[in-house]
Image (tube, grey):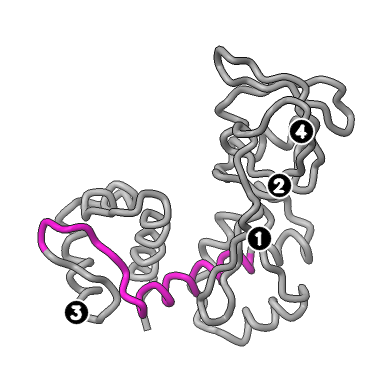
Amino acid sequence: MPTVTEENYLKALLALSDERGKVTVSDLSRSLGVSTPSANSMVKKLAERGLVNYQKYKPLSLTPAGHKAAALIVRKHRLTEMFLVEQMGFGWEEVHAIAEQIEHVKSPDLFQRMDELMGHPTVDPHGSPIPDANGHFTTANDRRRLSDCQPGEQVTIVGLAHDANDFLHFLNDRKLRLQTRLTILQKERFDGSMTLAYAGYDSATFSKTVTDRLLVS
């Protein structure tokens, strides 16, 4: 069974692979805030255990076993976040650090019970997909960035491309949540900023930095 450190490496490699496709040891070391030699040593260890494909000077990738192990860590993290929000009343900006600790608990029954109590949710509080018990992800095909939409369209927020705390607080201040219905009033050709209407706001303007991070359908 992977250690906490090994789990963090697997989860980071999965996230980087999804984001960039090709991942180097240097990418991994920067993501985890460790030295390149330390990352290289751990990658070799994971490769020996059949969890990572490693060849010197070539991109890293997870083996099928490594991918499943990483996905199950993500599953525990996202189920915990959803449980904290739905069952315990935490805000979506409060749950990441707590879930980072609980995701390493070695008790499948705990997470199975969480899943059952919540009726088997398919997404976490930020709209990210929760892998199933076999480590399989299901992602809706109709999601797109708000920045790709055009004036006149009506869309609903279904997820976030980035869920950093400062961004979540920004959204809280502007009463934007998942399932918020938006009407696109205007899109500036110069900088891509958008003017939107939604519940409580007849007209609110957001930068492309914000609209790039909002996933809608």
> Label 1: few (<14), some or many (≥20) within 10 Å?
many
Q: Nearer the viewer, mark 3 or mark 2?
A: 2
Q: Tell me the tag on residue 124.
A: 1
User: Mark 3 sits on what residue?
Assistant: 48
Q: Nearer the viewer, mark 1 or mark 4?
A: 4
Estimate the x, y position of residue 153 in percent, counting from the top left: 76, 33
What segment is highlighted magenta in the picture? 56-80
Q: Earlier in the sequence, mark 3 or mark 4?
A: 3
> Label 3: few (<14), some or many (≥20) within 10 Å?
few
User: Mark 4 sits on what residue?
Assistant: 153
Numbered label tally: 4
Alpha carbon separation for disc pair 2 and 1: 17 Å
Between 96 and 207, the one lying in front of the other is 207
Q: Secondary structure at mark 4?
A: loop
Amino acid of disc 1? Asp
**In the displayed structure image, the side of residue 74 where residue 145 appears, left or right:** right
Residue 55 vs 95, above or below: the answer is below
Q: Residue at x 71, y 67 (%)?
A: 83
Q: Is residue 78 magenta?
A: yes
Q: Earlier in the sequence, mark 2 or mark 4?
A: 4
Q: Earlier in the sequence, mark 1 or mark 4?
A: 1
User: Mark 2 sits on what residue?
Assistant: 217
**In the displayed structure image, the side of residue 8 where residue 165 appears, left or right:** right
Q: Secondary structure at mark 2?
A: loop
Question: Quarter holding the N terminus?
Answer: bottom left
Alpha carbon separation for disc pair 1 and 4: 26 Å
